[in-house]
Amino acid sequence: MSATRLFTEADLSAGTEAELTEAQAHYLRHVMRRPDGSPLLLFNGRDGEWAAELALRGKKAAAARVSERTRPQVVEPDLWLCFAPIKRARIDYVAEKATELGVTVLQPVLTQHTAVERVNVGRLRANAVEAAEQTERLSVPEVRTPVDLMRLLGEWPAGRRLLMCDETGGGPPIAGALAGLDDAARAAPWAIVIGPEGGFASAELTALRRMKDVTAVGLGPRILRADTAALAALACWQALVGDWRQPTPRLSSDYRSSRGAV
Ligand code: SAH
């Protein structure tokens, strides 16, 4: 039986028991019909990945008996995705795909031309957890509450570079701009900034272009929808700056997880 891979908030070390959430217990007991002792893999974003066994408790609850570490925690590139909220199905898609592509923070931003203002942060987080479980990531990106773009820029952390996707033209193509970075720029924390479906307002474009560590780039001759632009920019960034530059590590095949996650 292949192991089911789950995110947990609990600390993980050999011999401990991690309580599973109600949703996880329900999924393992009633959806997957896993018996007591079934193999699990757990990660919490801090302690690496651990092999564990399902411990059924009473009629509803479940815990995990943690045995040995299967992978050490790794340091991931520090990459935020700042994007304007879009309609439900497409924002869920961005949360899932951006998690697969390795973002560390999902930051919804409200702009003058943002059509959708309400964001269900809890649902985005659930999407991010599920994607992290399935994609063999060792962490889950932090999903932040929406913030006004101008305020975000006003409080921008020193040293975090911005990759601004600018559909109005004039910026260099993304590949050349990223390939030309020096080692210090590559090692810096980054953020990718994508505008709303209605585009950035001119005051916003001016404010973005005035930021200290901003690189405005183009993503080719076609205007992409915001979700496509986010994922295209993320893929380029990982390939030219991030962890796609390293050989793909082997995963511990003895413990390979099943693809279905909670
Ligand atoms: N409403 C705008 C398009 C906005 S597309 C218009 O019709 O002109 C949404 C966002 O995706 C943009 O703000 C930009 O950040 C990004 N984007 C889309 N296509 C792009 C391209 N070819 N180059 C750079 N960024 C792009």
Image (tube, rainbow, N blue to C red):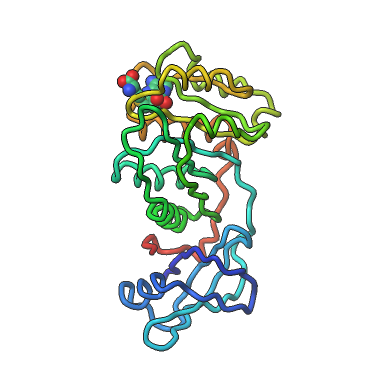
In the displayed image of the protein, which residue is found farthest to the bottom?
Answer: 58
Q: Quadrant of ligand 1?
A: top left
Q: How many marks?
A: 0
Seen in the picture, residue 20 relative to 112 is either above or below; the reply is below
User: Horizontal placement of 224 versus 210: left or right?
Assistant: left
| Residue nearest the viewer, comparing 61 with 146 | 146
Location of the N terminus (image quadrant)? bottom left
User: Horizontal placement of 114 versus 137: left or right?
Assistant: left
Seen in the picture, residue 3 relative to 167 is either above or below; the reply is below
Q: Is residue 223 visible?
A: no
| Residue 107 percent location from the top left of the image | 48, 41
Seen in the picture, residue 163 relative to 118 is either above or below; the reply is above
| Residue 79 percent location from the top left of the image | 56, 39
| Residue 229 percent location from the top left of the image | 39, 30
Q: Residue at x 41, y 55 (%)?
A: 122
Location of the C terminus (image quadrant)? bottom left
Q: Is residue 121 visible?
A: yes
Q: Residue at x 57, y 69 (%)?
A: 10
Task: Examine the image and state in which quarter residue 189 appears.
Answer: top right
Q: Residue at x 35, y 27 (%)?
A: 113
Q: Residue at x 55, y 79 (%)?
A: 65
In the displayed image of the protein, which residue is found farthest to the right?
Answer: 184
| Residue 201 percent location from the top left of the image | 41, 21
